[in-house]
C-alpha cells in the first residue's frame, strides 16, 4: 500500500484554558467533541478550582493529570497569546508555554519555567473521534500500569490496541518510556512522537479507552491518547523520581510532533492532501 503525507490544521482557544478545539486533516476532524450542549455551556463557565468538564478536544493537563485539581490547573485558566506563543501561569508551579508550528508534522514546543527543582507532570489530554475498527500501535511490548485496578502491571497490548466496539468498559493505562504511538483508522494513520532533551526517560503515554463505560450515568464513548512527560498520573502521590522537574537553569523543554498520512488509491485517485 502506498501512503501520502496529509497536512494537519490546528485550532486552539487561549481564552478557554488553551484547549485544542480542532485537529483536522483534509475532510477529517480527529478530535472528539462532547455533543451534549449542557457540557459545552459548562466548559465555557469554568474558573480555577472547578471540577473537570469533559467537553472533548485536547486539554493541557499541568501540573498534574489526576488528583487535585483533576486534569491540572492550566485548563481552567486564561492563557495569553503572543503570535504563535501561548502561555499560562500556574500558582506555586511556574509558567507553561507552547508554540505550535507546521502542518505535517504539527510541531508543539513546550517549555515550563519557574523555580529550579519544582516537580510537575504534563500531558496533552487528546480525545480522538475514532471508529470501532481503529487500532493503536507502539513499538515493542512495553510494560504498562493499569490505573484504578490496584495499579497492576501488564504487558502491552493485552487487548488494548483495539478501540471498539463499545462494550461498557473504561480503562486507563500508563505506559512509561513510550515516546511514539500511531492510531490507524480506515485510510488514515495519525502519529504522535515526543521527546525531551532534558529527561528523555520520562516520556510516557496515558491511554484512556472509554467504550461507553463511563460515567456511570449517561456513559459515552471517548478515546484519550495522551503524550506526556512523567511516569505517574497524580503529582500528589507520585514517586519523586517519576516527576519531571524544572531544571537548574529554570526551565524544562519537551516537543511533540503530530503527523498524518493517508492511503492512496492507485487508479484514478485524487488525493485531497
Image (cartoon, rainbow, N blue to C red):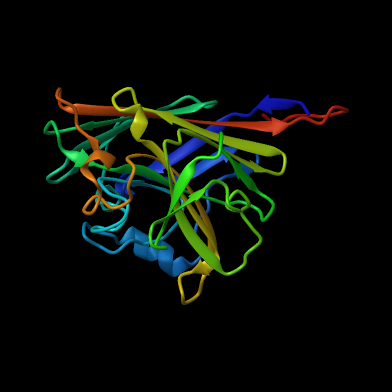
Residue 241 placement (x, y as % from top left):
24, 39
Please state the total of marks drawn on the protein image.
0
Residue 29 placement (x, y as % from top left):
58, 45
* Residue 20 occupies quadrant: top left
From the viewer's perspective, tell me whether residue 139 is left or right of residue 43: right
Taking depth in this image into account, of 174 and 86 the one nearest to the observer is 174
Residue 209 placement (x, y as % from top left):
52, 56
* Image height of 138 relative to 210, above or below: above
* Residue 111 occupies quadrant: top left
Residue, x 64% and y 46% (percent of image)? 135
Residue, x 14% and y 46% (percent of image)? 91
**Can the viewer see residue 202 in this picture?**
yes
From the viewer's perspective, tell me whether residue 273 is left or right of residue 19: right
* Image height of 266 relative to 74, above or below: above
Residue, x 38% and y 40% (percent of image)? 228
Quarter of the image with the N terminus is top right
Taking depth in this image into account, of 82 and 197 the one nearest to the observer is 197
**Can the viewer see residue 243 in this picture?**
no
* Residue 188 occupies quadrant: top right
Q: Residue furthest bottom?
A: 217
Taking depth in this image into account, of 86 and 125 the one nearest to the observer is 125
Quarter of the image with the C terminus is top right
Residue 78 placement (x, y as % from top left):
25, 47
Residue, x 38% and y 62% (percent of image)? 150
Amino acid at each position: 500500500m502506498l501512503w501520502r503525507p496529509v497536512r494537519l490544521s490546528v485550532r486552539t482557544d487561549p481564552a478557554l484554558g488553551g484547549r485544542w478545539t480542532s485537529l483536522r486533516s483534509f475532510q477529517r476532524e480527529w478530535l472528539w467533541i462532547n455533543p451534549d450542549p449542557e457540557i459545552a455551556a459548562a466548559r465555557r463557565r469554568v474558573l480555577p478550582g472547578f471540577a473537570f468538564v469533559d467537553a472533548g478536544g485536547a486539554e493541557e493537563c499541568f501540573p498534574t493529570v489526576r488528583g487535585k485539581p483533576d486534569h491540572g490547573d492550566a485548563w481552567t485558566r486564561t492563557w495569553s497569546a503572543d503570535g504563535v506563543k501561548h502561555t499560562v501561569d500556574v500558582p506555586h508551579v511556574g509558567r507553561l508555554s507552547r508554540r505550535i508550528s507546521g502542518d505535517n508534522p504539527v510541531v508543539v514546543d513546550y517549555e515550563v519555567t519557574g523555580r529550579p527543582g519544582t516537580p510537575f507532570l504534563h500531558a496533552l489530554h487528546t480525545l480522538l473521534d475514532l471508529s470501532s475498527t481503529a487500532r493503536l500501535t507502539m513499538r515493542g511490548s512495553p510494560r504498562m500500569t493499569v490505573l484504578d485496578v490496584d495499579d497492576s502491571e501488564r504487558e502491552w497490548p493485552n487487548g488494548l490496541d483495539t478501540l471498539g466496539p463499545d462494550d461498557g468498559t473504561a480503562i486507563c493505562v500508563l505506559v512509561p518510556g513510550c515516546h511514539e504511538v500511531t492510531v490507524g483508522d480506515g485510510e488514515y494513520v495519525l502519529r504522535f512522537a515526543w521527546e525531551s532533551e532534558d529527561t528523555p526517560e520520562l516520556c510516557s503515554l496515558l491511554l484512556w479507552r472509554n467504550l461507553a463505560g463511563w460515567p456511570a450515568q449517561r456513559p459515552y464513548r471517548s478515546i484519550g491518547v495522551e503524550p506526556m512527560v512523567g511516569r505517574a498520573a497524580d503529582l500528589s502521590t507520585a514517586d519523586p523520581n517519576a516527576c519531571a522537574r524544572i531544571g537548574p537553569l529554570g526551565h524544562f523543554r519537551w516537543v511533540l510532533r503530530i503527523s498524518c498520512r493517508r492511503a492512496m488509491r492507485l487508479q484514478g485517485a485524487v488525493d485531497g492532501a
